[in-house]
Amino acid sequence: MENNTLDNITKKLEQGIKDVMTGSGSQYKEWLKFISSFHTYSFNNSMLIFLQNPNATLVKGYKDWRKLGRYVKKGEKAIKILAPIISNKKDKSKEEKKEEMKTDEEKKELEIKGFRYVNVFDVSQTDGKLLPKSLKPQMLEGDSEELKQLLTDWISAIDIPVVFENTGSANGYYHLIDNYIAIHEDRSTMQQLKTLIHEYAHHLLHRKDGGEFKEASKDIKESQAESVAYIVMAHYNFDTSKYSFPYVAGWSGDIDIIRKIGIDIVRCSHTIIEKLGAKEESKEVVTA
């Protein structure tokens, strides 16, 4: 991204979205793993960071790094992301504005006028004071007591019923009519964890009463749910790459549809991670 005009950055972003979302399965999987650390960012900005530095783990602006006692190394190339241009609304009457001031004197009505690009740097591009370490669970395998407790915690964190039963050859399913998740009672706890997230993603994205992709094809629904499950499990340091992974290259050639799919995958993953994180009082959550 040598040409730093906003127009050029936007064009490269759109091309990057097409390349990542509809290109090789390995690049798409790398992006999903990347999102596990950047789920708090917008789809566009997480994609911009990934395209410029796929190894990034934590980015901040020059001044923000200085506040933390760290300094950008000489000669480091900035990562360009988009920031909104915000201004006060001017289309409200004086009476409306007075009424708003009565209820909350500090409240300001704002609107986004456009976007500009700003420079950020990854922590690897800085030196200085050590940062607090984020608490991240270690890899857990099989059917340990820790995994079973985690499954219990996750089930209590989501907002729909979960039952265990013999689901045949399937690891589980989401019941669209009765709105519950069923998980195979004889699968390993690790598989049950992944199935829980996969099926909960179906609930958030595909339920009949509000799922934005409820009319999507089965292939798209499965790809979305599996993508979300991969991100969430990676966030908790679980490697689920040994399981079958959908190949999504046939989604669409329409950039608006591709972008919508990507936005909802990131948004859904963030929603789930936030719900699960609420059960972990000791976990440090980094936002931007």
Image (cartoon, grey):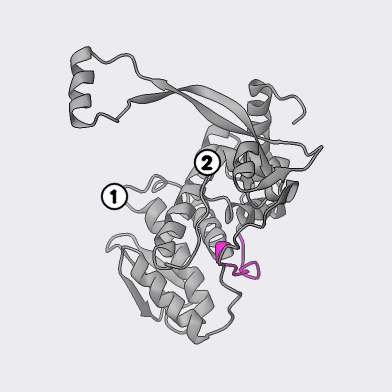
> Circle 1 sits on which residue?
209
Residue type pointed to by label 2: Ser
Residue 6, above or below 283: above
Residue 199 location (% of width, % of height): 43, 64
* Stretch of the chain drawn in magenta: 235-245
The majority secondary structure of the magenta stretch comes to: loop
Label 1 near label 2: C-beta < 8 Å? no
Looking at the picture, does residue 178 appear above or below residue 151? above
Q: Residue 177 in the image: x percent, y percent?
A: 28, 60
Of residues 125 and 49, the one nearer the viewer is 125
- The quarter of the image holding the N terminus is top right
Specify which label sits upstream in the sequence, 2 or 1: 2
Secondary structure of the residue carrying numbered label 1 = loop
The residue that disc 2 covers is: 42
Asked if the stretch drawn in magenta spans residue 236, the answer is: yes
Residue 228: x percent and y percent? 51, 57
Residue at x 57% of width, y 62% of height = 134
Q: Is residue 6 left or right of residue 211?
A: right
The three-letter code of the residue at mark 1 reads Asp
Q: Is residue 136 visible?
A: yes
Residue for point 71% across, 51% down = 128
* Residue 71 falls in image quadrant: top right
